[in-house]
């Protein structure tokens, strides 16, 4: 269950469904200042490029939100 701050941030970023590969969030869609914090949070983690944009698993985005707003 997400608290209000968690839900607002989660809802602010569109989720991309990648057929056969799950869901991703694009780095460019994450609002500042959270974008930079998310990048720091993700150091050493896996991401992929979708149409030239950095894309991260929704699972990682959710973990960041729960870390940021416990």
Image: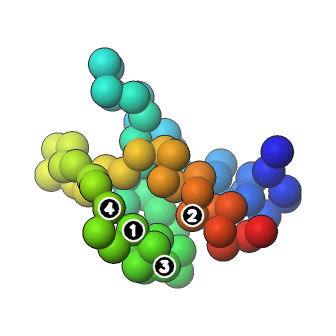
Side of 53 relative to 13 (left or right): left
Q: Residue at x 27, y 53 (%)?
A: 47
Q: Check the image and report above or below for 30 versus 50.
A: below
Residue at mark 2: 64
Circle 4: element type: loop
The extreme top residue here reads: 20
Q: Using the numbered discs, state the Cα–Cα distance from disc 4 to disc 2 in whole angstroms.
A: 12 Å
Residue at mark 4: 45
Disc 1 to disc 4: CB gap under 8 Å: yes
Circle 2: element type: helix
Query: From this viewpoint, is residue 53 visible?
Result: yes
As drawn, the label of residue 42 is: 1
Circle 3: element type: helix
Residue at mark 3: 37
| Label 3 vs label 4, nearer the camera | 4
Q: Residue at x 48, y 79 (%)?
A: 37
């Amino acid at each position: 269950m997400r608290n209000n701050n968690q839900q607002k941030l989660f809802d602010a970023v569109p989720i991309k469904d990648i057929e056969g590969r799950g869901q991703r969030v694009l780095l460019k869609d994450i609002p500042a200042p959270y974008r930079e914090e998310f990048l720091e949070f993700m150091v050493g983690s896996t991401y992929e490029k979708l149409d030239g944009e950095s894309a991260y698993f929704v699972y990682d985005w959710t973990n960041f939100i729960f870390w940021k707003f416990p």
